[in-house]
Image (cartoon, helix red, strand yellow):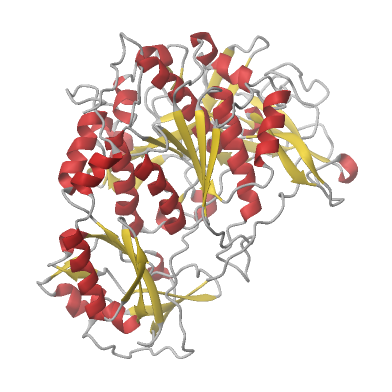
């Protein structure tokens, strides 16, 4: 389960019905403006999706435009150098982090920069209507957009709706090029409505169907057909925190995450969150929440709460995010029960609102570790947001904040999108991308094995004597692969094979970096208030998975590693890759018992999602089949360097790490 971050750009709406196919706007031809020597193009600001959509022509010059102009700040190269130095275990500056105040003093935009950008925008015809130290919000019209950004706005028809977007790269005058990081909002797909909503009630209920096992292999499906020459086990009912802590070696450390600050960033905020977390912890032996242990930092208003539909294509489905929020917090508390938790609820699932929430973390150092279980396929994301996100994560690294993102649940994404691709923001270079596994935990909570998470599903035949079309079709799997637009970071070069990294002769970023349990059939038992068909709402528990689970599990383990190290670890990837090939990781493969041994589980699902009144669907779930991705010996594009072993957390101790130091 992993909500999609939709591209909710700030509105560039058409106020006039007429769209001219060749109307010239004041300010000169956009192509000519982009080519002028006194202008500098902004990389990533040419939308990719417009190439395949019918162009309806140039929009009227009076069409309303609202955009964000993100500020680059000062000394960007120096900030990058600081972030690299404090993140490199071999640097003398390793873990000598900066404070938020030091960041502001050295790298925040100067007043002169803000004044220069403001003068340029107002001179083009925009009004500055809001902003902060990270961006300016401007309003104007399409004519002002062409004057300011050197691109005409065109109308494009997509999925039955008309959206506006620039006809190519936007540009800025060379006089302010060093002051502008990116411009967003000119691309309005999908359209964002301007009104506030109240949050809906709990989502529709989901209940797991029996039989289920308390641990892997406890119950065998002996009355059902064999598969791959053997009787297969039923799925587990969902692992508890105790089982995961023990399986990954966290329980043996005796660490609890005390003194560590973890943040979870999602959209919206469940109205039953506190009661759900409390009831779950009580039911499963997790530590009770201490007063003040959980803090909630919410947006002032909520927007786009409706479910996505033809009428509301920009809807985020707020109630679906309740489960994500609850899962993230229950899982991270299960792994690090004494860590202090901060939940940040973005106003919507749009980039601008999620960026606002992430900036709050850095601005006040609300956490040392941040778990983010959201994203979208790379080719559907807005490239103009890459430098915006990069700056957030790089600033976090300089401060000693590590950002962890789930790598996706669609494998190589081809089944869902038609093209192999990775997910964003997980593919960015200052992020730890968390992949997924199928995890087998034994009767004594011991680690048995893991495969890369990738599931093929075959239904029980109508006769009940065989599995139809074994192994069946691909259902879900850990996101991974090679980014089409992010270059290979230095810390991947010694580890990632060229067979994965090279794209047209150039080395690119490969994801994920690390992995943990994600398969919903070997997933986590979570508790949440749900809405049942009779209209009642009540707390219930069900098994859940996805890299949405893997990310908070890894965040919790990182909290224990931080406690072991005696201070924040910051951006973790250089240290993670430094441990590659050691006993700190399980080297996860798709066939832990050899290629001749296929692993699978039997699963029943209620047809109506809640009970047996409409019958059940019986299926065989074959493990280790992640689309075109493969978990192999060594680094791979399903599990990265592997999953944490019992030796992982201790490796950050006195012989494996160094205490963080302030400057």
- 644 over 608 or under it: above or below: above
Using residue 76 as the reference point, say whether residue 157 is left or right of it. right
In the picture as drawn, the residue positioned furthest to the left comes out as: 37
Image point (19%, 56%), residue name: 110
Does the image show residue 571?
yes
Image point (74%, 21%), residue name: 213
Image point (20%, 31%), residue name: 85
Does the image show residue 147?
no
Identify which residue, 550 or 115, lies in the foreground: 115
Identify which residue, 58 or 88, lies in the foreground: 88
- 527 over 149 or under it: above or below: above
Image spot of residue 31 (x, y percent):
21, 77
Using residue 391 as the reference point, say whether residue 249 is left or right of it. right
Q: Quadrant of the C terminus?
A: top left
Res 469 → quadrant: top right
Identify which residue, 361 or 596, lies in the foreground: 361
Image spot of residue 481 (x, y percent):
40, 40
């Amino acid at each position: 389960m992993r909500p999609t971050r939709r591209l909710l750009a700030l509105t560039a709406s058409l106020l006039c019905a007429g769209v001219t196919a060749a109307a010239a706007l004041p300010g000169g031809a956009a192509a000519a403006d982009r080519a002028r020597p006194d202008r500098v193009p902004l990389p990533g600001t040419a939308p990719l999706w417009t190439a395949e959509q019918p162009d309806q022509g140039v929009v009227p010059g009076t069409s309303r435009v609202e955009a964000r102009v993100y500020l680059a700040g000062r000394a960007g190269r120096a900030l990058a150098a600081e972030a690299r130095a404090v993140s490199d275990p071999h640097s003398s500056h390793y873990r000598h982090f900066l404070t938020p105040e030091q960041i502001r003093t050295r790298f925040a935009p100067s007043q002169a920069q803000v004044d220069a950008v403001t003068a340029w925008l107002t001179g083009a015809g925009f009004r500055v209507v809001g902003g902060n130290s990270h961006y300016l919000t401007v309003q104007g019209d399409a004519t002002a957009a062409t004057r300011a950004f050197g691109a005409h706005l065109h109308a494009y028809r997509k999925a039955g709706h008309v959206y506006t977007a620039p006809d190519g790269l936007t540009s800025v005058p060379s006089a302010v090029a060093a002051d502008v990081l990116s411009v967003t909002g000119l691309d309005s797909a999908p359209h964002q409505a301007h009104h506030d909503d109240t949050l809906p009630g709990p989502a529709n209920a989901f209940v797991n169907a029996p039989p289920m096992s308390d641990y892997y292999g406890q119950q065998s499906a002996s009355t059902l057909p064999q598969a791959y020459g053997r009787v297969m086990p039923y799925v587990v009912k969902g692992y508890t925190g105790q089982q995961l802590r023990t399986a990954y070696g966290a329980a043996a450390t005796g660490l609890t995450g005390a003194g560590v600050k973890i943040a979870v960033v999602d959209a919206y905020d469940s109205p039953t969150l506190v009661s759900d977390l409390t009831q779950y912890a009580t039911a499963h032996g997790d530590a009770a929440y201490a007063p003040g242990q959980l803090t909630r930092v919410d947006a002032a208003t909520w927007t786009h709460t409706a479910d996505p539909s033809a009428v509301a294509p920009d809807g985020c489905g707020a109630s679906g995010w309740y489960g994500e929020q609850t899962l993230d917090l229950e899982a991270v508390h299960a792994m690090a029960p004494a860590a202090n938790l901060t939940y940040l609820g973005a106003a919507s699932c749009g980039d601008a609102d999620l960026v606002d929430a992430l900036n709050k973390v850095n601005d006040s150092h609300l956490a040392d570790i941040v778990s983010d279980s959201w994203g979208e396929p790379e080719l559907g994301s807005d490239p103009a947001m890459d430098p915006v996100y990069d700056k957030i994560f790089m600033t976090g690294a300089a401060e000693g904040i590590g950002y962890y993102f789930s790598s996706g649940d669609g494998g190589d994404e081809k089944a869902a999108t038609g093209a192999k691709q990775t997910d964003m923001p997980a593919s960015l270079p200052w992020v730890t991308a968390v992949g997924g596994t199928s995890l087998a935990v034994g009767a004594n909570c011991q680690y048995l094995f893991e495969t890369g998470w990738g599931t093929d599903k075959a239904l029980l035949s109508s006769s009940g004597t065989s599995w139809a079309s074994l192994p069946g079709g691909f259902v879900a799997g850990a996101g991974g692969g090679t980014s089409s637009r992010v270059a290979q970071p230095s810390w991947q070069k010694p580890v990632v094979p060229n067979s994965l990294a090279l794209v047209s002769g150039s080395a690119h970023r490969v994801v994920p970096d690390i992995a943990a349990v994600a398969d919903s059939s070997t997933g986590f038992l979570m508790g949440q208030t749900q809405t049942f068909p009779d209209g009642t709402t009540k707390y219930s528990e069900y098994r859940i998975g996805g890299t949405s689970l893997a990310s908070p599990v890894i965040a919790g383990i990182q909290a224990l590693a931080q406690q072991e190290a005696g201070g924040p670890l910051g951006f973790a990837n250089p240290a993670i890759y430094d441990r590659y090939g050691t006993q700190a990781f399980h080297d996860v493969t798709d066939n832990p018992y050899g290629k001749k041994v296929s692993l699978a589980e039997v699963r029943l699902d209620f047809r109506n999602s809640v009970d047996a009144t409409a019958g059940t669907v019986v299926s065989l779930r074959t493990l280790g089949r992640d689309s075109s991705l493969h978990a192999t010996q060594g680094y791979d594009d399903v599990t990265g360097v592997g999953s944490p072993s019992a030796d992982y957390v201790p490796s950050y101790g006195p012989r494996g790490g160094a205490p963080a130091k302030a400057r």
